[in-house]
Image (cartoon, helix red, strand yellow):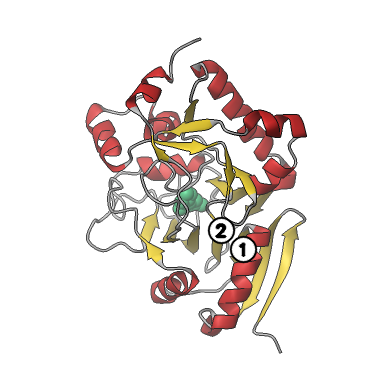
C-alpha cells in the first residue's frame, strides 16, 4: 500500500494529502509531494499534528530551510527558524507584519534574495472568527489571460516595496518603522511575467507591487490592481478553513496568498520557509523608485 494519497481540492488549485507523519520525510514521499506541489500549488495535510521538530525536518527534507524573518520587527532574532504568526504581543511584539498578511502577497518578494520556494504553515490555535487562508494560482492566472494581454505584459518590470505592503496596514508608518523596513528589504524590480527555470510562466504580483518601470504611477497601479483581481477569481483560488493540527505547504513562487481578517489574539500559526535558488529580479534603482509616483 502506498504511504501517501493526494486528492485534488479544486480543478486548478489545491491538493489534500493523506500521509502518516512518521513518513513525512521518506524520500519517496518527498518526491511525490514535490511533483504534486508543482501541479497543485498548495497541499494541505489535515490534522497532521506535526511538532516544530517534525515541521523543520520536513522543511529541510523538502529543500532546506531559510530564515528571512530575522529582520522582521517583533521577531526574536536569535532563534526563530519557526516564526510565530500571531497578533499576540507576548509572542510577536510588532504585529504590523502579521496584519500585512490580510492582503494578497508573495513572501519575501521585496528582499534582495532568491525568492523563497515554499512556505509551510501549521495551525496551533484557531481564531474565533476569520483566519481562513486563501491561495491564488499565479501560473493559472497567467495561462488563462487572453493572448494579446500576455504579449502586452512580456518584459514589464514591477517595483515591489515594503512601503506598499504596509500601506493598507498603516497609511504612512512612523519614520522609525519605515527605516527599519527599508534596512531589511531593499525594494525589488521583478518581472511581471516570470519565466521559471521549468519553462512555465506565472504572474508575480501582490499588494507590495507599487510601480512598473517606464509607466506612469497611476497607470501602473491600476494595471497591478486589475491583475490582482483577475488572479483572485474563484477558479484560481483555494480557501483553507483550518482545523487545529493542519499543515499546508505552498509554492511561494507561483501563488499569492492572504488570510481572512481576524482580531483574535489567540490565533497562532507556526511558519517555516523553504529557500529557493531562482532569483528573477534585482534591487530597484533609486531612479525608478523616484519615478514611481510620476503622473505621466
Ligand atoms: C504567512 C502568511 C497567512 C496566515 O505566514 O506568510 O501569510 O493564514 N500567513 O496566517
Ligand atoms: Mn505570507
- Res 94 visible: yes
From the viewer's perspective, tell me whether residue 27 is left or right of residue 2. left
Q: Quadrant of the N terminus?
A: bottom right
The picture places residue 20, in percent across and down from the top left corner, at 58, 82
The picture places residue 159, in percent across and down from the top left corner, at 45, 31
CA gap between label 2 and label 1 equals: 7 Å
Query: Which label is found at residue 250?
Result: 2
The furthest residue to the top: 296
- Which element type, helix, strand or loop, lies under badge 2? strand
Query: Residue 14 appears in which quarter of the rendering?
Result: bottom right
Q: Label 1 belongs to which residue?
A: 37
Is there a contact, CB below 8 Å, between mark 2 and mark 1? yes
- Give the residue displayed 66% in from the left and 28% down from the top: 152
Query: Residue 223 appears in which quarter of the rendering?
Result: top right
* Ligand 1 within 8 Å of the CB at mark 1: no
Disc 2 crowd rating (10 Å Cα; few below 14, some 14-19, many 20+) is many
Q: Earlier in the sequence, mark 2 or mark 1?
A: 1
- Which element type, helix, strand or loop, lies under badge 1? helix
Amino acid at each position: 500500500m502506498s504511504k501517501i494519497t493526494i486528492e485534488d481540492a479544486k480543478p486548478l488549485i489545491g491538493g489534500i494529502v493523506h500521509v502518516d507523519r512518521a513518513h513525512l520525510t521518506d524520500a519517496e514521499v518527498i518526491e511525490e509531494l514535490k511533483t504534486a506541489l508543482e501541479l497543485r500549488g498548495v497541499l494541505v495535510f489535515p490534522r497532521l499534528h506535526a511538532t516544530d521538530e517534525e515541521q523543520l525536518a520536513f522543511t529541510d527534507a523538502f529543500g532546506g530551510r531559510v530564515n528571512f524573518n530575522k529582520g522582521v520587527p517583533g521577531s526574536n532574532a536569535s532563534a526563530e527558524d519557526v516564526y510565530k504568526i500571531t497578533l499576540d504581543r507576548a509572542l510577536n511584539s510588532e504585529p504590523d507584519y502579521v496584519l500585512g498578511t490580510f492582503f494578497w502577497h508573495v513572501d519575501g518578494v521585496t528582499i534582495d534574495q532568491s525568492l523563497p520556494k515554499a512556505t509551510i504553515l501549521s495551525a496551533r490555535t484557531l481564531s474565533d472568527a476569520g483566519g481562513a487562508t486563501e491561495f491564488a494560482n499565479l501560473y493559472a492566472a497567467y495561462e488563462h489571460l487572453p493572448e494579446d494581454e500576455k504579449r502586452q505584459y512580456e518584459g514589464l518590470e514591477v517595483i515591489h516595496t515594503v512601503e506598499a505592503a504596509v500601506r493598507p496596514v498603516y497609511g504612512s508608518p512612523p519614520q522609525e518603522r519605515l527605516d527599519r523596513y527599508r534596512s531589511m528589504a531593499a525594494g525589488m524590480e521583478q518581472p511581471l511575467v516570470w519565466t521559471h527555470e521549468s519553462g512555465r510562466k506565472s504572474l508575480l504580483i501582490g499588494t507590495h507591487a507599487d510601480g512598473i518601470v517606464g509607466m506612469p504611477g497611476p497607470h501602473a497601479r491600476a494595471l497591478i490592481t486589475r491583475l490582482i483581481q483577475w488572479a483572485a477569481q474563484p477558479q484560481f483560488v483555494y480557501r483553507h478553513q483550518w482545523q487545529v493540527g493542519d499543515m499546508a505547504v505552498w509554492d511561494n513562487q507561483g501563488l499569492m496568498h492572504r488570510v481572512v481578517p481576524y482580531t483574535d489574539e489567540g490565533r497562532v500559526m507556526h511558519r517555516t520557509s523553504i529557500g529557493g535558488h531562482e532569483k528573477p529580479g534585482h534591487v530597484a534603482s533609486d531612479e525608478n523608485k523616484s519615478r514611481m509616483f510620476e503622473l505621466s
